[in-house]
Image: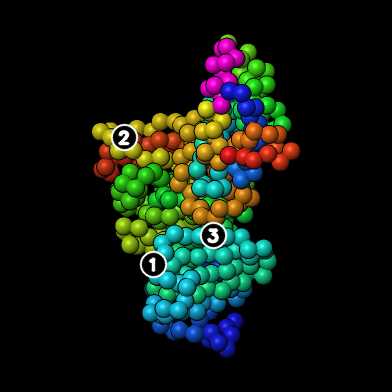
Amino acid sequence: MTDNARPHSLDVGIGGVHVRLRTDSPDFITLMADRFRGFVGHVDAPDHVFDVDIVPVTYAEDESLDGITTEVRVLRDGPKWRLLCGDFDAEWDPRTRHGHVRLHPSPYSLDSVLRILHTVMLAEQGGMLMHASSVVLDGKAYLFTGVSGAGKTTISRLAPDHAHLLTDEMSFIRLEDGEYFAYGTPFAGELATPGANMRAPLAGIFLLAQGPDNRIDPLNAGEGIRAVMANILYFAKDDALTAKVFDNAIALAARVPVKRLTFFPDARVWDLFGPTA
Amino acid sequence: MSTALYLLRSDNVAARQIGEELMIMSARDSALFSLNETAAILWNAADGSTPLAEIVSRDICPAFDIDAETALRDATELAHGLAERGILQVGNQPFDAGSAST
């Protein structure tokens, strides 16, 4: 399904949500197909359709795409959402599942739009994007979160060979029939490698700290919620959605163990994980 | 401390009781706060119409075995601190009477 003005399309499926991007630029499609490799493929009925208009960076008369503003703004506009930054201006209507994006011809711009879009979609469904690496080991997904430099990429790099990296940067969590699942994403960090396009039940969330040995310590309920909440990707300054995100964090921390993992950065840390973890 | 103060819970925050901990999430800046026992008392009593002095004498003095003057001074400072963070509104008239807030 394309339209005359935007004859080229690409379906990007992340976390089981398929977004069709329609544009007049075959070059941008090629760029996006590479950016989201492993997560593209035609579907007959996409969940959402976005019309993408590429705006040259030099288009000086475009006030919203100034190429300078780095603050992301996510605004509710009646039934629609508006997503704004210096390099993109998007609107999305959840009712029609249709959106329109104007952006600079950078894969990072569309990457940002998709991340932000997913934060809104997931929040309404009890899920979230979280600043965390995630790894599947023996059929279970483990999330590793913390401040920048805490070791999210390091611990994922140390995972055993038979483990699957879902992401080293941005974890995708969905609530499905009362159970939380972690999905792989193409949102890569330092490793610059897309995650595996798969899902697994979420078995634990670990707040990372580096230390001289490997140790897992429990967190109380409040600490667990704070650890989750501090790392949820979230931009909308919207009362209702804020309350929803907060409730989602509380529900997640109540359902999935949230613990502190202190680790020495070598592969032995993975001895703590496995069938009994 | 001659001017009466009234407190009202802000609209753009979400409050959740987690065990014994009252957590507040602000939509203004996505900040997450954990209120101590006194702040939680102020939050729960901040109906916009009860003077702070009454809240202090009714809820705070008995709980902490503290004299009213000291408690009111501390509670006033705390209320303004919560207002600065967008958790409460503070005004010198009952809010249902349309007082100016800080």
Q: Nearer the viewer, residue A163 or A80?
A: A80
**Image location of residue B99, percent across then percent down:** 68, 39
At 53% from the left edge and 22% from the top edge, which residue is drawn? B74
> What is the chain letter for disc 3?
A
Label 1: element kind: loop
Q: Which residues are magenta?
A: B66-76
Labels 1 and 3 share a subunit: yes
Question: Across the whole image, how many numbered discs are drawn on residues?
Answer: 3
Location of mark 2 (residue): A214
The reply to whether the magenta stretch includes residue A130 is: no
Give the camera-side residue of A176 and A32: A32
Which residue matches tag 1?
Answer: A68
What residue did someone put label 3 on? A74
Measured as percent of width and height from the top left, residue B24 is found at 56, 37
Asked if residue B67 lies in the magenta stretch, the reply is yes
Mark 3 burial class by Cα count in 10 Å: few <14, some 14-19, many 20+: many
Mark 1 Cα shell of 10 Å, populated few (<14), some (14-19), many (≥20): few
Q: Main secondary structure of the magenta part?
A: helix
Question: Which residue is found at the position 55% from the left and 43% from the top?
Answer: B26
Question: Disc 1 or disc 3, which is closer to the eye?
Answer: 1
Q: Earlier in the sequence, mark 2 or mark 1?
A: 1
Answer whether labels 2 and 3 touch (C-beta < 8 Å).
no
Image quarter hosting the C terminus of chain A? top left
Q: Position of residue A229 (x, y in %)?
A: 50, 43
Q: Is residue B8 left or right of residue A30?
A: right
- The reply to whether residue B21 is in sight is no
- Looking at the picture, the colour scheme in use is rainbow
Could you tell whether A194 is left or right of A84 in the image?
left
**Which picture quadrant has residue B101?**
top right
